[in-house]
Amino acid sequence: MTMYPEVKAETRRVVVVGHGMAGSRVVAELLAAKPELDITVYGAEPHVPYNRVLLSNLVAGKADEQSIQLLDAQLCGTSVKVNSGVTVTAIDRESRTVCASDGSRTPYDALVLATGATAARPPLKRLTCDDGELLTGVVTLRTLDDCREILRLAAEASERSGRPARALVLGGGLLGLEVARGLVQRGHRAEVLQFGPILMERQLDEGAARALHGALAAVGVEVRLGTSVLAVAGRERFQGVECEDGGFVPGDLLVLATGMRPDTALAAAAGLPVGRGVVVDDLMRTADPAVFAVGDCAEHRGVVHGLVQPAWEQARVAAQVIAGVPEVAPYRESRVVTRLKTSGIDLASMGEFAPDGTEDDTDVVVFQDTRRNLYQKVVVRDCKVAGAVMVGESATLGTVTQLFDRHDPVPRDRRLLLFPLAATAVGETVLPDDALVCHCNAVTKAEITAHRGSDLASVARTTRATTGCGGCREAVAKLLES
Amino acid sequence: MSDSSTPPRRTATHCPYCALQCGIWLDTDASGAVTVEPRNFPTNQGGLCQKGWTSVELLDSPARLTSPMLRRNGRLVPVSWDEALAYVAERCRELQARHGADAVGIFGGGGLTNEKAYQLGKFARVGLGTATIDYNGRWCMAAAAAGGGRAFGLDRGLPFPLADVGAAQTLLLVGANPAETMPPFARYLVAQRQAGGSLIVVDPRRTPTAAQATLHLQALPGTDLALANGLLHIAIALGHLDEAYIAARTTGFERVRRTVAGYWPERVERITGVPVPQQRRAVQLLGQAETAIILTARGAEQHSKGADTVNALTNLALALGLPGTPGSGYGCLTGQGNGQGGREHGQKADQLPGYRRIDDPAARERIAEVWGVPADSIPGAGRSAYEMLDALGTPEGAQGLFVLGSNPVVSAPNARRVEERLRALDFLVVFDFVLSETAALADVVLPVAQWAEEEGTMTNLEGRVLHRQRLRPPPPGVRTDLDVLAELAELLGSKAEFSPEPREVFAELRRATEGAPADYSGISYERIDAEDGVFWPAPSAAEATPRMFLASFAHPDGKARFLPVEHRPAAEETDERYPLHLTTGRVMQHYQSGAQTRRIPTLSEAAPEAFVELHPDLGTRLGIAEGDQVRVVSRRGSAEGPARLSDAIRPDTLFMPFHWGGRGRVNSVVGAALDPVSKMPEFKITAVRLERIAGREGRQGP
C-alpha cells in the first residue's frame, strides 16, 4: 500500500457526514489546507458543533451551553454549506452521491464519515416502552439534548417531591462518574451502580479505585460496587432498578453510562467493511479511496478510540490527504491518556499501569495516602514511562503525561515523578564568602561584610550592591548588621 | 573622598544598552576621567546594572576604531574619509546601474537613535532609492508589533507607564526574564511583591525572575499560545469575563470564545505540561485582581507563531477587560535600547516615519512632501530582515549592503547561511565603532561615534521619548552616522536635504510624524528635559500620552479586536536524531551580539564565553559533567561551549546565550522558520542533539 497516494486534482467537492467534534475539525482542517474546496457538512443534531467533552460540566452547572460551543465554518464567514438537524440516509458510492433526510442529494469527490457513536443500551428488562423508546426517566448521556433531558428530569423530580432528585447512574466508568458528580454539584443525589468489583476497571488498579471511591464519597457521590442490575421498575415513569441479588434501588431517574457503540450503519449499508467501527487505513481511507472515516466511528488497526484527541489527529490526516497536501504524515496510534474532568477529583490513567510483577526491567514508583485518598503510581520501563495512574491533586501529572507522550527518559531521582522539585532555600548562615549576594552587580558576601557597620547607601556607592534590581537590599542590610 | 574644590562636570543622560534606558549621570573630573552614577529617573529610580555601571569603559576602549578602512588585497587598511566615502558612493552607483536600485540595501538596528532610524529610512528611499531596507528589530519586536497592531490598531510596547507594573495586583510575565535582562526593571517586581501583589511567570526555565514568582508555570517551549487559550477557557468557565467591557470596547469575541472552547484544562495540560490546578490558580489570580497586567517578551514572541501567541494573550487581556483600563493592561517588554523608536520611523521594509504604512497613498504623499520628492519616487515595501539577508548576492537579492548598529553575523538566525550570504556580496560597508564580526567581513568599515559622543532621542519601552545628551565630541578620525549619511547623500547626488545635526533631523522627524499614529510633533528636546521624557503620541506641545487606549483603541471603529488563534507545533519538532529542544537568551553581563559588552573587561571576565545549560539528569545520561566541552547540533549547524548543569531547566531542553560568535555562535544552530504574520524567526525553539567533545581539562583547540 502506498503511503502517499496521488490525490486526484479534481477533488473539489467534499461532503462531511457528522458535525460533532470530529466533523467540525475535519471542516476546519480542510479550510486551513485548501480554502477553495466546496464543502458540505451534515449534522444530525440541530445545534452548532459543541465540545462533547464538556457536557458533564454542563450537568454540573459549571458551564453553560454557550460556553461549550465550538467554532464552525459558518461563523468564520466561509462558503461551507452546513445542514444542521439533517441526517444522511444513504451513500451511493457508484454515483458518489449522498442522500439526506431533507430529500437532497449531494455529489462528492471525497466523503468523510464522522458519524460518531451512540450510547449503548444495556439488556435490562422493561428498559424500553413498546414503541422502542426508553422508559420516561431513563436517559443516555451522549448529546446536548440528553444533557438537557437529564437536567429537566432531575429538576422535575425535585420539584415534585420537594427534595433533591435521586439519580441512579448505571456504569462506573469515566462518563458515569462525571455525570454523577455533576448532578451532586447541582444539589441532587447520585448513586453509581457498578457491575464490576472496582470503579473504572479498565483504567484503574485496585489502589487507585479505592482512592477514587473515597474521594467520591467525600464529595457526596454514592457508589454501589458488584451490582448486577437486571430490570427497570416503573410503568409510566422510572422508579428504580431491580438487582440480581433481589435488592431494589429506588430512584427518580436513571442515566445509562454503559459505553458507546460506533455509528456504522450508514457505512455498512453502503457496503464498506465494518468491524467494531468503519475500517480505515493509516490515511483514514476506507476500502473506497473516495470515502474516509474519522473519530468515534472509525476503526484503525483494530482500535476504536472514542476519545477526542485521536479524533482530531485523524481529522487532520484525512483533511490533508483530501486537500492534496504533499507527504502527509500517516496517522499513528495515539497514546491515550484518560482524565476525569470533574472539580475536586483529579484522576489520570495512561498506558500500562498494572505490570504483572515478573518483568525485571520494570520499576514501579508508588505513593499512597489512604486518609487523603491520594494514589500515585508510575510504571517505568527502560527509563521511560510505560504507564501511570494518579488519583488526587498532583503537581507532576503534566510532566508525567509529557514523558509518556514523548517517550522521554524519566528523572534519575524517581521521586521527582511524584513530587515537584522543592526549591532549595539557602540560609545566609551557610552562605560561603564567595557567594554572590547582589547578582546584578556581582557582589559577593565577603565584599559586603568587609563594610560591616557602614550604612546601606555607602555600601551601595562603593560596591554597587543593591543598585540593580534591588532584590538583595534586605540580605545586604542583614550582612551589614551581623 | 572626592576633591570638592573641582566639582565634576555632570551630564544627565541614559545608559546605552537596553530599552529601560536607565537615567545616569556621567561625571567628568578635572583630568577628563569619566565615571557613571545612576540618576533618580522615573524609570530606574536610582538603579543600575553591571552593564550600565561599566558603560563608560567602552568610550576609551583600545578596541575603538578611529580611521576608515578599505579592503585591499584581502586586508582592511586605513584610508582617509574622503577616499572611503568616494569609494562607497562609486560602488553604489555602479551596482545600482548594473542591477537596479534595489541592488543596494541597508540593514539597520534597534539601538540607533530616532534621528538615525529616521534618516536611515530616508537615505534608503531617497539617497539610494532602494526598497531594500530592514533592521535587526525585526528579530526582536516584530511579533509583538504585529500582534499589538492587530489587537489594538497600534503597538506601543507598554501602553502605560512602568509605575503601573509596580502597582498591579497581579502580573503575568510570559517568556520574560527581566531580573537578568534588565535588572533595574525588577525593582518594580520587588515593589509589586512587597505591596502584596502576585507574580505569575511562564517560562520553561526557572530563571531568576521565575524564582521570585508566586506561581511559576514551566510550560514546554513553544506552547504559550495553547496555555493562553487554556487560561481564557478557564476564565470563561469561572465567570471572570468583563462582559460590559467586551460589549463596549471590543469586537470578535464570539469566534474566540468558540475557539477556546476546544482548550479545556486537561488538554492544555497535555500540550503544555502545566498542571490543571496551576492553570486554575493563575486564572484566579488574574481574574480576582483589581488591577492586572499581562506582559510578553521574546520567550513568547520569537516563534514561527509569535504574532498568534501575542494575540492569544491579548485575547485573554481583553476578555478580562484589562487594556485601556487604568492600572491594568497588556504590554510587551521591548529589548533593544531604541527598540521602540527604531520600529516607528522607517527602518522597517514596510514602513514610513511615525508608524505610517509604505503602501498607504496618503502616507506616501505626506512623507514625500516633507522630503521634497515626488511620492511615486518612494519605493514600495522591501523584504523582511531574514528574507533580505537570505537573498544577498543572489540574482533576486541585493549585491551591496550597508550595515549600521547591528552585527548580523552573530545575531541572525541560521547564522552560517547569513555569514555565507554576506561573504557573497559584491560590496559590504559597515558603520561601527569596534571591529565586530560583521565589520570584519566588510569591504569598507566606517568608524562612527558612540552613544556619549552625539546627541539624540531614544524611545524607551514605555514609549517615553528620552534625550541622550552628548558628553564630549568623538575622538579624532571618528564621525557621526548622521554626518556620514549626509555626505554620502550628497555624493550620490540626492536632491533632498540630509542634515548632519540631530536637532535638525528631529525637527524634520516631528514634521514627518505629525498626524501619524506615532506622533512626535509636540515633542522637543527642551520639553523632554523639563518633563523627564515625553510619552507619544504627543500631537501638540501641551499633550502627551502616558496611558493609551483609555477612551478608544486605534482601529477605525475605536474597538479592540479579538483574534481566534490555534496552537500549532514548532516549525521543527524533535525526533530521534534531534531529541532535545534548544532555547536561547541573554545573560546579565552582555547585550545583544556582545560586540560592545565583550570588549568591556569587567563584563567579559564575569561572562567570558558561551555555555550550554542542561539538566543534571541529561548530563548523567549523556556522560556530561560540569565544565565539559559540549556541542549542540541541529539540522543546520553546531555551536560549542562548556556544559553548565542546572536543575532550573527542563531535562528535555537546553539553553544557550546568544552573545558570542565563532564556535560559541548559537545562531548557527537556530533555524530560519519565519512567522507568516510578522516574519519573526523562530529563535526560541530548535530541535537539537547534544554531544560531548572533551572533558573539562582536555579542551580542544579551535
Image (cartoon, coloured by chain):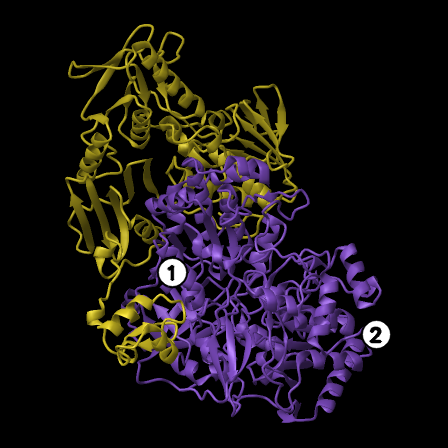
User: As displayed, is residue B608 above or below residue B190?
Assistant: below
B507, A355: nearer the viewer = B507
Q: Colour of chain A?
A: yellow
**Mark 2 / mark 1, whichever is N-terminal:** 1
User: As displayed, is residue B431 above or below residue B68?
Assistant: above
Check the residue under mark 2 and report the chain it is in. Answer: B
In which quadrant will I find the N terminus of chain B? bottom left
Tell me which amino acid carries mark 2.
Lys
Q: Residues within 10 Å of mark 1 (few under 14, many from 20)?
A: some
Is residue B137 among the parts visible in the rendering?
yes
For residue A206, side relative to residue A341 (left or right): left
For residue A84, side relative to residue B217 (left or right): right
Identify the residue shown where x is 23% and y is 50%: A379
Q: Position of residue B330 (x, y in %)?
A: 51, 51
Q: Position of residue A318 (x, y in %)?
A: 52, 42
User: For the residues marked 2 and 1, what is the alpha-carbon distance in whole angstroms?
Assistant: 54 Å
A471, A235: nearer the viewer = A471
Tell me which amino acid carries mark 1.
Val
Identify the residue shown where x is 52% and y is 74%: B15
Q: Which residue is mark 1?
A: B190
- Which circle, 2 or 1, is nearer the viewer? 1
Q: Which residue is mark 2?
A: B495
Q: Which chain is purple?
A: B
Check the residue under mark 1 and report the chain it is in. Answer: B
In which quadrant will I find the C terminus of chain B? bottom left
User: As displayed, is residue B437 above or below residue B346?
Assistant: below
Quadrant of residue A437 within the rendered picture = bottom left
SS at mark 1 in the image: helix
A229, A348: nearer the viewer = A348
